[in-house]
Amino acid sequence: MIQAQALTKKYAHTVAVDQISFEVAKGQIVGFLGPNGAGKTTTMRMLTCFLPPSAGTATVAGFDVLEQPLEVKKRIGYLPETPPIYPEMETAEYLKFVGRLKGLSGADLQKRVDYACERCAVVDVKTKLLGKLSKGYRQRVGLAQAIIHNPDVLILDEPTAGLDPKQINETRDLIKSLAGDHTIILSTHILPEVEQTCEQVIIINKGKLVATDSVRNLQARARGAESVVVEIAGRNVNLEAGIVQHKLEQISGVSRVLSKGQEDGRAFFEVESHKGRFVRGDLARAVVESGWDLNELRPAAMSLEEVFLQLTASEAAADAEKKEEKQ
Amino acid sequence: MRNAWIICRKELGSYFVSPVAYLLLTMFGLIFGFFFWNALGLFVIEGMQMQMRGQSFPMNVNEQIIRPLLSNVSVIGLFFIPMITMRLFAEEKRTGTIELLATSPIRDLEIIVGKWLAALILYSCLLLFTALNFAFLFKYGNPDWKPLAIGYLGLLLQAGAFLAIGTFLSTLTKNQIIAGATTFGVELLLFVIGWAGEYETAAWARVLSYLSVITHFESFGRGVLDSKDAVFYLTVIFLGLFFTARSMESLRWRS
């Protein structure tokens, strides 16, 4: 649905986006991830035909962003970082205006306005002035504006920025529910957001593509050995953390045991195994056989945050190496 | 041009939902009303003096009331036009709504024409106030309507030219005050630039005098439709909107 080929944007002295290539299949939710200033917004603006690329090409639904911008714009719904609303307009009036801009008219327009209001839960503020709405409502009106013409592609720039936790959850659910009908690209610098909403991740840093893969693959790729979190409680006896740690270290396959503290007779550990060894079974048996209670045993999934840091860090390390070679 | 009309309607909505339109209408109505009252008072006094001296100098409503008032309107417009155009693009750039327009399937030209047309319609509403006053002249006097109609055409063309310049200047900044102040400055300069022609007859002075917006209004004010002057205004309108389009394009490449 979306294809970018060596997409580049240069400003007078800086390269904001440097030869980024990626593809997004129909119906997918893709997270566009990167620290602030990585070039996410610039890339999105190029895809929406707001900015022309300095080099490279991008096509949306088969239309080139430079050659046929009007065709591309018809098929894209775009929510910029700040929702583009007119404070002096009422919600329904505004959605009608945007609908007309996107080429809707008559009964069709009214139907789409009603649909978008319902879908984005802004029915109860239909006749309110946009300037008087809360941040959460504005964001949802922004989303309603983006889906008004039922576009093939939705491009959302930091859709949850500045919302409170409840609103963030609602917005995420809303985006997920839109996924079936639309192909969605959303940008964010909040990692859990990608883990929760997206199937595919594109990570960029300093304008360059760092990684593009599915969320699951990325997590697996960064995690070589297994790592488990264990909580152990003593049964009628006082637990000695040192003894427990010693016991755990003796289990075959365990490479490292980290004590994570002790509280009310419970002890917490993080146990890492050697590559390719699964120690959870042996670990459970050892604990029970020693007469302790096993309160918790779960794999410590590597969060995307760590993956991200690892990827961007290795990138930085590679850069440093190159510099050394030059010297 | 359906899209231009959509933009135009939205702009008119913004003018008339906010206090902007009503404020301008009220101020303009008061100021013009005062001018009208003065002109009428002067006319009546002159008429009485003529009678007392026993002279029968011909009195003419068109020449003595309508013509000076129309020139007055063209000067008052100078103050009101920057207030109409300053928000057109500057505000959209400041609030980020320009991104919505620029990523919608409409052409830049349609956005520009729509906005300019809305500004022209608001200005026409101001002119309606003058028509209200002139209506009294028709009730109690017997002026010729044709010079008045041509005068209005001249005012609209002149305003169209100024509005096009203001629209262009509004695309250059995010700050409405800057947009308004530069528009006022440029318009005032275009207004007074012709004064050079009054004491100097060299070629440069004649060029300056030709560039002046006021010299081209004189014939309209007299009730004469001179195609040379109409073409001048239409050219300025075209150039203003053309530069606006180029400016919008450059926004994308620079941003």
Image: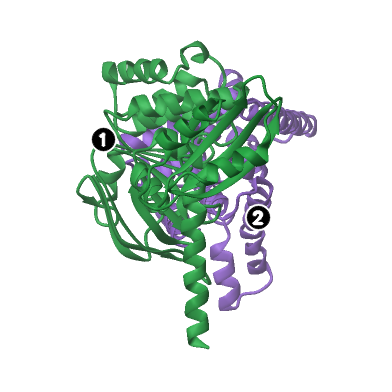
Q: Colour of chain A?
A: green
Which chain shows up in purple?
A: B
Q: Position of residue A108 (x, y in %)?
A: 27, 19
Which residue in the structure is indicated by mark 2?
B182
Residue B124: mark in rendering? none
- Give the labeled residue for mark 1: A27
Residue A1: image location, x then y, percent: 23, 44
Residue at the image point whose x is 38% and y is 66% from the top: A54
Residue at 41%, 29% in the rendered image: A145
Judging depth in this view, the residue of B217 and B173 nearest the camera is B173
Indicate the amino acid at tag 1: Gly
Pick whichever, B165 or A57, lies toward us: A57
**Residue A234: percent from the left, percent from the top?**
63, 25
Q: Nearer the viewer, residue A218 or B128?
A: A218
Packing grade of label 1 (10 A; few <14, some 14-19, many >=20) is: some
Q: Is residue A113 left or right of residue A323?
A: left
User: Are callouts 2 and 1 both on one chain?
Assistant: no
In the rendered view of the protein, which quadrant contains the N terminus of chain B?
Answer: top left
Element type where label 2 sits in the image: helix
